[in-house]
Amino acid sequence: MKTKLFSMFNRILSGLLVILGFSACHANDETEPCEYGSPTVDYHIMGRVTDASGAPIKGIRVTVKGVEPYTEALPPELAKKAVVFTDNNGSYSTEDISTGGIGTRLRVVMEDVDGPDNGGEFAKDSVKVTEMERKQVRKRSNWYLGEFELKADKMLKKNHSH
């Protein structure tokens, strides 16, 4: 009796699983596209670096990095686009940086690499992407989250440790 009951329970359970499995395989409609991969977003990062008096600082290395230690080093194809230097006006602008899944975990690091040249020695500083002024310039489409211009102006303090 116990074996018959167990067998019948297994058949009912198997039937339910078959019905549930087929109901999960419905035809795709336009409101729910079938996509694979991970979301991507494009960033164009720009800004201006100044000293405490508001004067522009030329020659500051501006590097886009990850926030967490495991994402700090960007993939090689992004890393070459992610390092720029400020011009005579203290302005910088990166090429478009396309990220997949790490977009909001980026930061921009400003670092004086020329020593006392160009106005003195300045302390390293950074700005997280989430703290930047953001303007969407291309709308999202499915997995593509869009293109954004990010503005990160920064005032660097003199480095008094030297």
Image (cartoon, grey):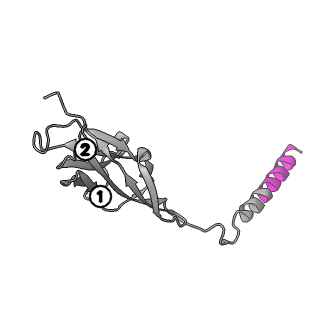
In the drawing, what numbered circle is on residue 94?
Answer: 1
Say few, some or many: other residues with alpha carbon within 10 Å of mark 1 (under 14 / 14 to 19 / 20 or more). Answer: some
Task: Please tell me in which quadrant of the rendered image residue 155 appears.
Answer: top left
- The magenta-colored residue range is 2-15
- Determine the secondary structure under disc 2: strand
Camera-side residue of 37 and 2:
37
Write down the residue under mark 2. 50
Q: Earlier in the sequence, mark 2 or mark 1?
A: 2
Query: Which residue is painted at 83% across and 55% down in the image?
Result: 12
Mark 2 residue type: Thr
For residue 149, the mark is none
Residue 33 vertical placement versus 127 (above, below): below
Disc 2 + disc 1, Cβ < 8 Å: no
Does the segment drawn in magenta span residue 9? yes
Residue name at image x 69 percent, y 66 percent: 25
Tell me residue 140's x, y (percent): 52, 64
